[in-house]
Image (cartoon, grey):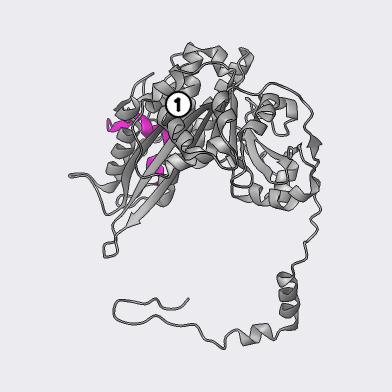
Amino acid sequence: MPYKQSSRLPGERASRLGHVVLINNVLIKELLENFQSDDETIIETEANWQEITDVSEPLSIIFSADGSYQIVESEKPPFKRLVYVKTALLKMDFHDLKKIDKDLPHPLMIKDMISDWAVYHATVFPLRHIKLKGKNLYDTVREVIYNSLRDEKLELEPFETLKWIVYEKWTQNKRKLPPFQCPVCRSENATLPFDTDKGNCPDCNGEIFLTDYLGFHQDLGEDIAPDRVANAYMLIHELLLLFTGIRYLWQTNKELLKESLFIKDGPLYFGAQYAKLVFPIRRFIEFAKEKGYNIHLIGQEKSGRFFEHLELIKRNATNNYYFIPSDSYIKKEIQQRADIGNPYGERTNYGSKLFVKTSDYHQMVISVPTGEFIPNPRLEDLIGIDRIFATFPYILSNKYEGALLPLELAHGIASLSTYPSAKILKVFSQSKVI
């Protein structure tokens, strides 16, 4: 590792002769020739592609959520660091989709649609050497996250959705929060009574927030927060935006809920301490299915191991085909590890992976819920998959390979610096079944 450049002295440069011993090695020469070859390597896998044959009706209403974050760091010591986070939710219906040219969408049409049917959330919190008066960074971030999720511009709806999920308010059981780690004394006995926003730890009497249940504080130091806190906040808020729609329609119009598709950027997944959200989400989706109301929810992956694997195997598939990887396949072919241990995603995923190829320009990795966890799901285990397949032809975008138009537009909103305010309930309350 060379010495870095400072404000007074130049950095250390690598030797120009250090590579000579490498390029003269016969074995290395052979490997480099293979590396530089343009010939396609034939990838042999056990991927069992199946034709999409079920014919069903497309879903009438589409909701999509995406997010982004940007880290800003000062150039001088002590190198203060903060992060801006933005998430967005967009609603489209069948009439909107029919009007849009997928090759050259009219910008004024997109502008009108976004003005009527989009909401966004934006916040900022510190990561290093910035804090509220009288508080350290640890408590500053906790308080900012709590207040940010209670965004008054969105009428506190995502925060109410968080309560609805963690207290499982769709049931008749007024349950308190399961025990979690107290952010003050670190005991594992912290909890809150049913439907409360904040309270006190039973062990130390320190103030705890509902958002502490999610475990952000477990990633925080006293004076520094890693970047993954920003990513976790963004992913959680994306989910809460989508589930605000699910919750609202569940409470007001279940028939419309049956006709709606909810699309999230990224996999249906939470890792580490945030995985505690996975279990109530699964239970609700299973509960709704048993009541006769399928929750049509998908997550699309645009990077990562599964996406890279699709790039390898997609040439072996015919258009309009799908492939559901088994637990054994995922461990062996994608994770490249021994087929031992717990099933993939058992404690982290609320959706099962699915490879889909609809055309030579539209291949994607999506996740679809099954309700209760199923290690090796079949097509019929994926909730509402027939109607999701039927909807794909109407939501594909030709602007990017494998793109879904609602997610593409939601990303455009989430990545903007400013956007007109909108009330979140308008997105749901003025929807109609087409």
Q: Quadrant of residue 163?
A: top left
Between residue 267 and residue 203, name the one nearer to us: 267
Q: Which residues are magenta?
A: 204-219
Does residue 96 appear to the left or right of 40 in the view shown? left
Q: Residue 27, how many percent across, how many down?
A: 75, 79
> What residue is shown at x 31% (from left), y 27% (from top)?
198
Q: Residue 280, how many percent across, how many down?
A: 52, 25
Q: Quadrant of the C terminus?
A: top right
Q: In this rendering, is residue 179 above or below 302?
A: above
Between residue 395 and residue 222, name the one nearer to us: 395
Between residue 29 and residue 122, name the one nearer to us: 122
Residue at image mark 1: 178
* Number of marks: 1
Q: In this rendering, is residue 72 above or below 125?
A: below
- Characterize the local packing of mark 1: few (<14), some (14-19) or many (20 or more) Cα atoms within 10 angstroms: some
- Secondary structure of residue under mark 1: loop
Question: Quick check: is 121 in the magenta stretch?
Answer: no
- Is residue 189 visible in this depiction of the protein? yes
Between residue 186 and residue 305, name the one nearer to us: 305
> What residue is shown at x 75% (from left), y 30% (from top)?
378
Q: Quadrant of residue 194?
A: top left
